[in-house]
Amino acid sequence: MLFILDNMVSDEDVQINASTFFGFMGVSMALVLANLGAGYGTFKAGAGIAAIGIWKPEIIMKSLIPVVMAGILGIYGMIVAVLLSQKVSNPTDYTYKNGFAHMASGLCCGCSCIAAGFAIGIVGDVGVRGNAQQERLFVGLILILIFAEALALYGLIVSLILSQT
């Protein structure tokens, strides 16, 4: 497949290099997978908030913290996608090493955000339900959410390092 892509010619008679395909796959994977994690975290935590909102509406605003933290995951993906898209350059100057590094960068950020989104969603759902029954759980809930968010932050840092090639 790489041989076929390497021998393609564009409309301007410029040889197309398959390495740009991998670079743009990194861009799309960073954004799509990060938003997948953010969406799942928002969905799962939002379901818990809706359930306790009927029973204890006075703690709804305090219970929105998991939803906000899940939304930050999408921002991480957008940051990496914008940085990577600016580095995918002219197909003749863009090497396979760059393409593979940028794809690894996007996957690193995206997969870390999926894991963090799952953790934030599940902990957020159970945590806000538990917080509605026992107020002393709130500090522990926030600490667990911070450590779940740190998973995505680690992926973002490694992704930024990988994108510097």
Image (tube, rainbow, N blue to C red):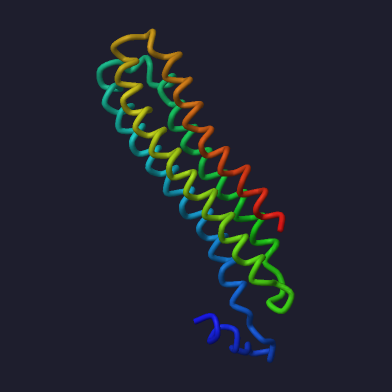
133 lies left or right of 95: left
102 lies left or right of 71: right
- Quadrant of the rendered image containing residue 91: bottom right
Picture coordinates of residue 119 (x, y %)? Answer: 40, 34
149 lies left or right of 80: left
Q: Is residue 64 above or below residue 117?
A: above
- Quadrant of the rendered image containing residue 136: top left
Picture coordinates of residue 127 (x, y %)? Answer: 35, 22
**Residue in view at x 44 percent, y 23 percent:** 144
Q: Is residue 9 above or below residue 165?
A: below
The one nearer the camera, 60 or 108, is 108
Picture coordinates of residue 58 (x, y %)? Answer: 36, 14
The one nearer the camera, 131 or 107, is 107
Quarter holding the C terminus is bottom right
- Quadrant of the rendered image containing residue 134: top left
The one nearer the camera, 164 or 126, is 164
How many numbered marks, from 0 up?
0
The one nearer the camera, 128 or 115, is 115
**Residue in view at x 49 percent, y 38 percent:** 71
Q: Is residue 4 above or below residue 22?
A: below
**Residue in view at x 42 percent, y 14 percent:** 138
Picture coordinates of residue 10 (x, y %)? Answer: 63, 87
Q: Is residue 26 above or below residue 12?
A: above
**Residue in view at x 35 percent, y 21 percent:** 128
